[in-house]
Image (spheres, rainbow, N blue to C red):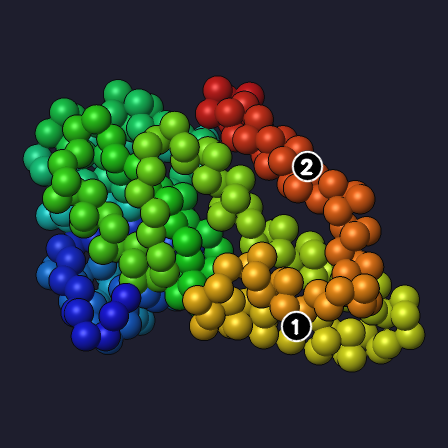
């Protein structure tokens, strides 16, 4: 989000305010974002709602103390973000369907729940957008994939893009690519953390202290990422610059290539995609 281009959004309701919803809310509360009608949130417990109630412009409701909390949150909201666990989605949609105003845009962040499921349970006057943000939203560095529903307009899609751009970058894809996207950017932070974890263990095995290993590995990942971001060159070119002919790095890269690292990523992401499809089918 550019500080030179203020974002103006209509009233937003978050049904389910877990870590992902809270990250998005943090983005919405940045300077340069204006919400006409404020932000409404619902949680199951009053304690969770109280954590959000103190934020300026946020009205927080708890379903354990107010049976009509979800209905109160969606009243007058133009954007409704469904952020509950996937298994809870159908019941929630049936609850709110009759209280959504025509023209409301419902945005799903529920993994594995299809647009068809949402549209079958909501009025035809309501648009649906499916999204897949990732956890770096917490620090404003998310990559979010979004897909339009069959009833959403270009304006509805633009509204969803503006929402998620408050916490990072946005990619618009057809819905059939959302599950594949989830195996790359959705699960991707876990892959990066796993690589950091394993390289740190290797550094410790080579005699460094855990503190030294963490500094070396985390600093290297951070520095390489920032170098890539600042450079006009692609990763392959930047790698070649580090890989001197007949040097140590070349020998290490040869080991990765012998292990067919690309094929390993193919297999891993294929496994994640298969599981995403199982989840969509209710398995």
Tag 2's secondary structure?
A: helix
Q: Which residue is mark 2?
A: 263
Give the image location of residue 180, x and y in percent.
Answer: 48, 35
Residue in view at x 26 percent, y 21 percent: 120
Q: Position of residue 192 (x, y in %)?
A: 62, 56
Q: Nearer the viewer, residue 246 or 48?
A: 246
The residue beneath circle 1 is 220
Residue drawn at 11 percent across, 29 percent down: 125
| Kind of element beneath mark 1 | helix
Residue 61 can be seen in this image:
no
Give the answer, above or below, for where 271 lies relative to 32: above
Tell me where residue 247 sits by quadrant.
bottom right
Question: Residue 117, position in %: x, y?
Answer: 33, 24
Query: Which image quarter is the N terminus in?
Result: bottom left
Q: CA distance from mark 2 to mark 1?
A: 25 Å
- Of residue 140 and residue 99, the one placed in the foreground of this image is 140
Is the residue 148 above or below the residue 201 in the image? above
Q: Looking at the image, is mark 2 or mark 1 earlier in the sequence?
A: 1
């Amino acid at each position: 989000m550019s500080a030179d281009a203020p974002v103006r959004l209509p009233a937003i309701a978050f049904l389910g305010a877990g870590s992902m919803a809270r990250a998005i809310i943090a983005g919405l509360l940045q300077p340069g974002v204006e919400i006409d009608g404020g932000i409404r949130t619902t949680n199951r417990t009053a304690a969770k709602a109280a954590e959000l109630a103190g934020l300026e412009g946020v009205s927080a409701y708890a379903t354990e103390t107010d049976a009509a909390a979800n209905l109160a949150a969606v009243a007058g909201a133009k954007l409704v973000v469904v952020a509950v666990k996937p298994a809870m989605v159908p019941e929630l949609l049936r609850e709110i369907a009759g209280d959504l105003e025509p023209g409301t845009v419902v945005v799903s962040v529920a993994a594995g729940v299809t647009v068809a499921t949402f549209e079958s349970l909501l009025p035809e006057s309501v648009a649906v957008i499916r999204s897949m943000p990732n956890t770096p939203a917490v620090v404003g560095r998310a990559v979010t994939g979004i897909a339009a529903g069959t009833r959403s307009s270009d304006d509805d899609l633009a509204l969803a893009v503006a929402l998620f751009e408050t916490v990072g970058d946005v990619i618009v894809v057809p819905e059939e690519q959302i599950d594949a996207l989830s195996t790359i950017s959705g699960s991707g932070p876990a892959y990066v953390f796993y690589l950091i974890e394993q390289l740190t263990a290797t550094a410790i095995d080579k005699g460094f202290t855990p503190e030294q290993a963490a500094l070396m590995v985390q600093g290297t990942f951070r520095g390489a990422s920032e170098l890539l971001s600042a450079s006009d060159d692609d990763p392959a070119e930047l790698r070649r610059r580090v890989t001197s002919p007949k040097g140590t790095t070349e020998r290490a890269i040869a080991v990765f290539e012998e292990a067919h690292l690309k094929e390993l990523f193919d297999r891993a992401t294929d496994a994640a995609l298969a599981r995403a499809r199982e989840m969509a089918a209710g398995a």
